[in-house]
Image: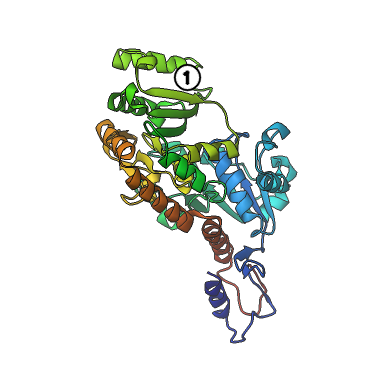
Amino acid sequence: HIGRWFAHVLQLGTESSGPPANIHIVCMASPTTGAAVFSSHPVEWRIPIGCDFSGFFVEVALGFIPVLRPRVSSLYLLQTRCPDSFLAQLPADEAHAYLSAQVADHDRSASETAGSIVIEHGNPCLMRQFPLRPLHVVARLMSEGMLPLDQLRCAEAADEIWVPTQWHRDLFEAQGLPPARLSVVPEFVDTQLFRPRAAAAARRRGRRGGATFLSVFKWERRKGWDVLLEAYWREFRRSEGTLLRLRTYKPAWEPGPEDIVEWLRSFARQRLGSSPGALARVEVVEELSREGLAEEYRGADAFVLASRGEGWCLPCVEAMASGLPTLTTNYSGPAAYLTEENSFPIRIAGTDGNRQAEPDGDHLRQQMRRVATDSALAEAVGARARADVVERFSARRVGDVVVERLAAAVAAKQPQRGLGEKLEL
């Protein structure tokens, strides 16, 4: 990428071996890492959510921000400051990166924002109303199905739209968003925190009894908990010793009881005419720190999620980075990285009018049985998953993509400069 940007500069009319004195380079290599560094303009990345371990916060505050802090000279995270009790649950490097970048919305003046590249994360209709237009406005969008019409209209106000996968790019283009504004910028996964350990693998190989499946999700219909529970309970008998661990919680907007165990009892009774105590074991896992979650992945034999649609599925990629064989619906965001060699994709039975899928419960049962009975295959698939995720979604790879997009945004603002003018990239 660096060579491309030097070539861009040289096209402006110099044959010298270095950059001309009147040109400020947008992208240079770090003398310590060799990675491209963006230094020409401040970058504001805004997430309109609180502090928890949900997708948006982890994606930006614990993902992009730590990755980009060494590579973007002026980077600001616009978000309400997390309480110290929450920050104490984070690894020290993530907490430090967060505190170094975090500012409140009102801490950046209108003139400062006007000279910045602004990334507005999530629902584009919640973008700020700018008194002065920023240099470049990016809408970071993802969805599990069709984008609502009001969000389509709001997204058109952005100069550029970042989506996590080619699936989203194709879908949003089909819905009418200009293809020239759509760029694929994948998410990052911490491949150091989420990594396999030899001791955990040896413990799994020596374990007596059935397989342990882990699922991580919030308790809502889209996550397919009903498909997962029915498939698991119909496929495995309690005497086989299998275990399904659910790291889950019920968000405030979901109707119904707060107690997940009560949901399990009701579902077992209504769908299978039984009780959880007579069926294959299920355990509900309480809230975990990031390190605790990493240990959960390492302690399981496989990860499973029967989702009806995902923007990206961060837990899927974390599980794959941890070397776990991963079973999830081969649709929407995950279809960008699932293969028959690195995972156990679940077929879909069809889609609804909003392009959300219905996972094939019978195929899920088959895939869970394969993992439970063929540990050598499961281990090989998990190893390939780890290799693929490190290759495609490591800090260095995703950082390169973001820095390139920032540099392109600035270069696009300078199309008409003459050779006698200073080119401020």
Left or right of 26, for residue 258: left
Residue on which disc 1 sits: 260
Q: Residue at x 29, y 35 (%)?
A: 369
Q: How is the image coloured?
A: rainbow
Amino acid type of disc 1? Ile
Residue 318 picture location, percent across and down: 49, 44
Q: Is residue 418 above or below residue 83?
A: below
Q: Residue at x 57, y 61 (%)?
A: 403
Residue 219 picture location, percent across and down: 46, 26
Closer to the camera in the image, 334 or 364: 364
Closer to the camera in the image, 197 or 20: 197
Label 1: which secondary element: helix
| Viewer can see residue 196 | no
Residue 211 picture location, percent across and down: 38, 34
Quarter of the image where the C terminus is located: bottom right
Q: Residue at x 46, y 45 (%)?
A: 317
Left or right of 58, for residue 32: right
Closer to the camera in the image, 114 or 325: 325
Q: Is residue 288 above or below residue 8?
A: above
Closer to the camera in the image, 204 or 91: 204
| Viewer can see residue 123 | yes
Left or right of 267, for residue 161: right
Give the crowd class for mark 1: few <14, some 14-19, many >=20 residues within 10 Å.
some
